[in-house]
Image (cartoon, rainbow, N blue to C red):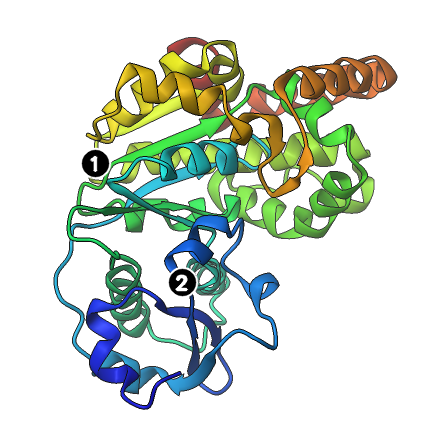
Amino acid sequence: MSSNWQDQFGSNPGLFPHLMDLATDQVLISQITEEGFRQASFLDQRIVTPQLPRQLVQWDELSALDCPAQSQPQYIFHIGHVGSTLISRLLGEIDAIFALREPQLLRNLSELAQAFARENSSWTVETYEARLSEVVCWLSRSFHAHQRVMIKTSSFVSEIADRLLQNGASALFLYVPLHRYLPTILAGENSIKETGALLESRLQRLERRIGSMPGEARDLTVAQQVAASWLCEIVTLFEAKNTSATNDIKWLNFDDFLAAPKEQLLAIAGHFGHDLEDGQAASLVAGPIMSSYSKAPEHDYSPNLREELLVEASQIHAAEIENAMLWINELADRFPLIASAMQWIETER
């Protein structure tokens, strides 16, 4: 990195606040090109290579730098494994959108928010709120004056969706119904492992919202673990809808998107206030983005292949899926918040 990077920081989004070290109160600044952002599926440690120019700086040093006022970001929140990366890539092809996918600092801040809930955070509430505002400002910078940043978050960043939307930002909330989410996760070994890794934190998040632990992790079947994960993220988004300062939220079932991708892409762009011509939308959904795996574009993938995998998983795991859905319905009978969230998903959308 150049020796005068501090002078460029406010106007150069390529100087990207990438990772944070809570113990040393430092931030890793990485130098990423515009094309690098366009290609990246994740803006976390997975893109750090020996060739990536980077430098650790103290948070206070970064706070002291000028961050000019920008249009606040627009957001894609989601429950995980519901096409958010695909939709972010499609929208990122619109000239007026600068797409950021899963910036690590927002994940860190979401984890810290959960630490506040457990009353074991190393930051004060005032420090947290000030630094969240700083991070949003840093992430709002774009390469071109006509661009607006659109952030596709990690699923569990929905924990702070209400904070991120407090100034009326626009958002897309992506989901699928439970009966579609269960085979989606059960169809993939890595998805099942990820569910297990996040299960304890998701159960704790759900407990804080409904006042009781829905079940002990060790006692849940794999399908129930998946169902509990879906429930946590759905309830989190439902609460964010109810408590955030914005009404500018579009809910979208990913299956509806796949059923009519051109029309849905036009609707999403319109929701965010971006111009997208019918021909460009048709070209995008007929192009390579739709026929490759969005998180690893070197691999082929398609809506038809996805549907084949879901049908197969639904057949293989039919009994486990049915039992998990019955369990979730039982929880809805016990907890009004769960019932309200599920009714919203099932009938209002």
Residue at x-position 25% and y-position 75%: 9
**Marking on residue 33:** 2
Q: Is residue 308 left or right of residue 5?
A: right
Q: Residue furthest bottom?
A: 3
Q: Is residue 136 above or below residue 212?
A: below
Looking at the rendered image, the disc whose residue lies closer to the viewer, 1 or 2, is 2
Does 301 appear above or below 161? above
Residue found 78% across the figure and 28% down from its top = 187
Mark 1 vs mark 2, CA separation in Å? 32 Å
Kindly identify the amino acid type of the residue bearing the numbered disc 1. Answer: Thr
Which residue is farthest right?
A: 316
Dot 1 falls on a residue whose secondary structure is loop
Q: Is residue 184 above or below residue 13?
A: above
Q: Nearer the viewer, residue 222 or 7?
A: 7
**Residue 329 shows up from this direction:** no
- Which amino acid lies under the numbered mark 2 shown in the image of this protein? Thr
Instruction: Say which of 307 and 24 sits in front.
Output: 307
Residue 139, visible in the rendered structure: yes
Residue nearer the viewer, 205 or 80: 80
- Residue at image location 30% in from the left, 74% down from the top: 127
Q: Earlier in the sequence, mark 1 or mark 2?
A: 2
Residue 318 point in image, percent of width and height: 82, 14
Q: Do labels 1 and 2 touch, CB within 8 Å? A: no
Residue at coordinates 82% horizontally, 21% vertically from top-left? 320
Instruction: Give percent across and percent down for residue 108.
Output: 47, 64
Residue 159 placement (x, y as % from top left): 44, 48
**Which corner quadrant of the image does residue 249 belong to?**
top left
Residue 84 placement (x, y as % from top left): 49, 35
Disc number for residue 246: 1
